[in-house]
Image (spheres, coloured by chain):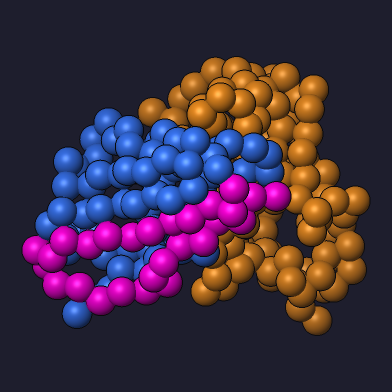
Amino acid sequence: DIQMTQSPSSLSASVGDRVTITCRASQTISDYLNWYQQKPGKAPKLLISAASSLLSGVPSRFSGSGSGTDFTLTISSLQLEDFATYYCQQSYSTPLTFGGGTKVEIK
Amino acid sequence: EVQLLESGGGLVQPGGSLRLSCAASGFTFSSYAMSWVRQAPGKGLEWVSAISGSAANTYYADSVKGRFTISRDNSKNTLYLQMNSLRADDTAVYYCAKGSAGVWGSYRYTDTDWGQGTLVTVSS
């Protein structure tokens, strides 16, 4: 199985900050990488597919990049509604596996 | 609008059984693979099981293989997860998720929509 490692596991940031979350795959996965956002007590929400394709309705302050084994989710200017936990997921091979999550907290 | 509504969670003793259901609406159910993903309290997401749109193929995480059975009734637009021999480490919120294609794990597959989850607690 492909292991997905996210870093950091948590971070504190202020509204307006630029935030970067990293996801590393244990083997190359091309750009078969999805990002999900989960708010407390809610279901995950798909934000980005294919490493960098923003889903319809997702604010443009979110962006994804990377290929191979290293990927990044960037929030260009953090807003109050962005405080949540973010998960990466590889869709290169089954079983599809998630990273451990990155919790973005208010500083 | 896609809607997924899980039910069937609750408190069960170790070794017991439970069947979860996920009622789907707002899309052609039989055209899409479906998955169950769980989240233990305070922990991350763990894929549990998946089934193709036609129900011809099923998939299981090693942690549940032999104990859980996924199925679907396309005439009722409903997904199921039969959970037997439950253990304390099966305690989690169980989400059903709609896939982006009929075949699970196919090209650029994503879990596009999720239900609100149902809590399963395994405890004596």
Residue placed at 17% from the left, 41% from the top?
A60
- Check the image and name the residue furthest to the left: A16
Position of the N terminus of chain B, as image quadrant, is top left
Q: Looking at the picture, how far across and down is residue A63, in whole percent?
A: 25, 44
Residue placed at 62% from the left, 44% from the top?
A96
User: What hue represents chain A?
Assistant: blue
Say above or below: A50 vs A73. above
Q: Looking at the picture, how far across and down is residue B75, in whole percent?
A: 69, 20
Membership of B90 in magenta stretch: no
Q: Nearer the viewer, residue B69 or B58?
A: B58
Please state the total of marks drawn on the protein image.
Answer: 0
Residue B11 appears in the figure? no
Say above or below: A35 vs B32. below
**Chain painted in orange in the figure:** B
Relative to A31, A62 lies left or right: left
Q: Nearer the viewer, residue B93 or A21?
A: A21
Q: Nearer the viewer, residue B92 or A85?
A: A85
Residue A101 appears in the figure? yes
Relative to B54, B22 lies left or right: left
Q: Looking at the picture, how far across and down is residue A25, in whole percent?
A: 53, 52
Q: Looking at the picture, how far across and down is residue B41, in whole percent?
A: 57, 72
What span is in magenta?
A: A1-27
Residue placed at 43% from the left, 51% from the top?
A70
Q: Quadrant of residue B33?
A: top right
Membership of A22 in magenta stretch: yes
Relative to B57, A53 lies left or right: left
Residue placed at 33% from the left, 37% from the top?
A52
Q: Quadrant of residue B92?
A: bottom right
Q: Nearer the viewer, residue B11 or B47?
A: B47
